[in-house]
Image (cartoon, rainbow, N blue to C red):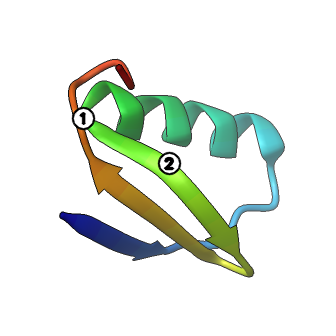
Amino acid sequence: MKSVVRKLFINFEKEEKWLNDMTAKGLNFVDYSFARYLFKEGTAGGQ
């Protein structure tokens, strides 16, 4: 299953932490377009 999250970051460190947190929850980053992140469900930790 795919999920779309719309979020705008100015601070790259916060963006990186958020992406790592999403991966830890089992949502693996797939694609990015201006303020739109596409995730695909997988296993926690991105494996």
The answer to whether residue 22 is above or below residue 47 is below
**What residue does disc 2 label?**
29
User: In the rendered view, does 28 fall on the left or right side of 16?
Assistant: left
Could you tell whether 12 is left or right of 31 in the image?
Answer: right
Residue 30 % position (x, y)? 53, 55
Q: Where is residue 41 in the image (x, y as percent from the top left)?
A: 23, 48
Q: Is 38 left, or right, of 32 in this rendering?
A: left
Mark 2 surroundings within 10 Å by alpha-carbon count, few (fewer than 14), some (14 through 19), many (20 or more): some
Rendering coords of residue 47 (x, y %): 35, 20
Which amino acid does the dot numbered 2 rest on? Answer: Phe
Q: Which of 44 and 15 is in front in this view?
A: 44
Q: How many marks?
A: 2
Q: Nearer the viewer, residue 40 or 34?
A: 40
Mark 1 falls on what kind of element?
loop
Q: Is mark 2 on a helix, strand or loop?
A: strand
Quarter of the image where the N terminus is located: bottom left
Query: Residue 13 shows which numbered tag?
Result: none
Relative side of 40 to 29, left or right: left
Residue that label 1 marks: 26
Q: In this view, does 11 lie above or below 22?
A: below
Look at the picture and state if 16 lies above or below 3. Answer: above
- Within 10 Å of disc 1 (Cα), the crowding (few <14, some 14-19, many 20+) is some
Q: Residue at x 66, y 46 (%)?
A: 15
Residue at screen point 75% across, 34% down: 13
Q: Which residue is drawn at 42% across and 72% down?
A: 5
* Residue at image point 53% right, 40% down: 19
Answer whether labels 2 and 1 touch (C-beta < 8 Å): no
Residue 9, image quadrant: bottom right
The amino acid type of the residue labelled 1 equals Gly
Distance from Cα at disc 2 to Cα at disc 1: 10 Å
